[in-house]
Amino acid sequence: MGAAPDLTLWGVGTSRTIRPHWAMHELGLPYKTKPIGPRTGETKTAEYTKLNPRQKVPLLQDGDFCIGESAAIVAYLSRMYSTPERSLIPEAPREYAAWLEWCFFVVAELDSTSLYVMRRHRADALGPIYGVAPEVVAKAGEYFREQLRHVEVALADGRQFLMGDEFTSAVVKVQQDTAIGNLKFLITGRSSKTTTQRNSFEITPLHYRYNIGNWIGVGLGAMVQVNISEQVTTEKKIYFIDQLLPLNIMTSVSTTKSATRWLGNWNAAPFADIQVGRVKTGPVLGLRYLRLLKGDITNRFFLYAGFKL
């Protein structure tokens, strides 16, 4: 396959975003995740709209190539990155045709015309947005169960998967082969956020300032920062769904806090700033740029207010 692919997958938290995540895990592909969700505003940003004008998730970036629609992403990954050891697509022409048939069946008959209709009109799902319609949900559920019989008939001959004993991406689209414990759950994505709460005092032993008239001042100097206390909080989220009730998207959140460190760290930084206002005597507003000597974020800007005596 050559160099490792540069893959980025946008989207978590829905049954449709499961498909490409699962496919890449089956193919053993390294990839980056952008854990954005639908109807959160994250798909409507200028950055994402430039990548996907339809403003939907999931979206796969493969280098400078972008492709949306979960089934299309899975088909692309299956064709592009299957290997003799890890393959999600049949090679024989007629088996490939049968694979296509199952893929279209799952997307059209099981997903779009039944599962999504149920999710769209359930009171505990998207009903508040598109309209709650219990009769529509009931009819869509009946239709789903009728169509699912085709899957049951196909598996009745003892085959392990839809395409015989070969695991393919048709199974990834049906989504029936993963469990957590004895319950049928599917993990659709993970995200992590780390925040640091720091209390510190700062000393400015060196500060040179030049005033340009009475209203503008510029300055250079050096600052020393001593941390009084520091605590790191890590929040981890896991997004998953219940396969027996795929309309419910759930999130598990765990938060851990480090022990508080007292007087455990220091830092230093040269700085440059500009002030406007009564720079000789009176109130001023300033913008300061710091270049810290160490830390995760070394370049910093901040606004401040002061009063010159």
Image: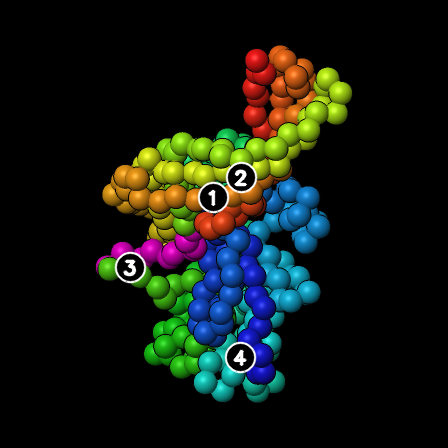
Query: Residue flagged by tag 3: what amino acid is it?
Result: Ile
Earlier along the polypeptide chain: callout 4 or callout 3? 4
User: Are there few (<14), some (14-19), or many (20+) residues within 10 Å of tag 4?
Assistant: many
Q: Is residue 123 left or right of residue 282?
A: left
Q: Secondary structure at mark 3?
A: loop
**What's the distance in space between the residues labelled 4 and 3, CA to CA?**
26 Å
Residue drawn where x is 62% and y is 12% of the image: 282
**What's the distance in space between the residues labelled 4 and 1, CA to CA?**
52 Å
**Which residue lies under the disc numbered 3?**
180
* Contact, mark 4 vs mark 3 (Cβ under 8 Å): no
Residue drawn where x is 71% and y is 50% of the image: 50
* Contact, mark 1 vs mark 2 (Cβ under 8 Å): yes
Q: Which numbered marker is on residue 268? A: 1
Badge nearest the viewer, 3 or 2: 2
Badge nearest the viewer, 1 or 3: 1
Earlier along the polypeptide chain: callout 4 or callout 1? 4
**Spot occupied by residue 137 in the image (x, y as percentages of width and height):** 47, 41
What range is drawn magenta here?
Answer: 182-191
Q: Secondary structure at mark 2?
A: strand
Q: Secondary structure at mark 4?
A: loop
**Which residue lies under the disc numbered 4?**
82
Earlier along the polypeptide chain: callout 3 or callout 2? 3
Query: Residue flagged by tag 4: what amino acid is it?
Result: Ser
Q: Is residue 309 left or right of residue 275?
A: left
Q: Is residue 251 above or below residue 28?
A: above
Residue drawn where x is 55% and y is 75% of the image: 4
Residue 259, can we see it? yes
Badge nearest the viewer, 2 or 4: 2
Residue 253, can we see it? no
Q: Quadrant where the N terminus lies? A: bottom right
**Which residue lies under the disc numbered 2?**
222
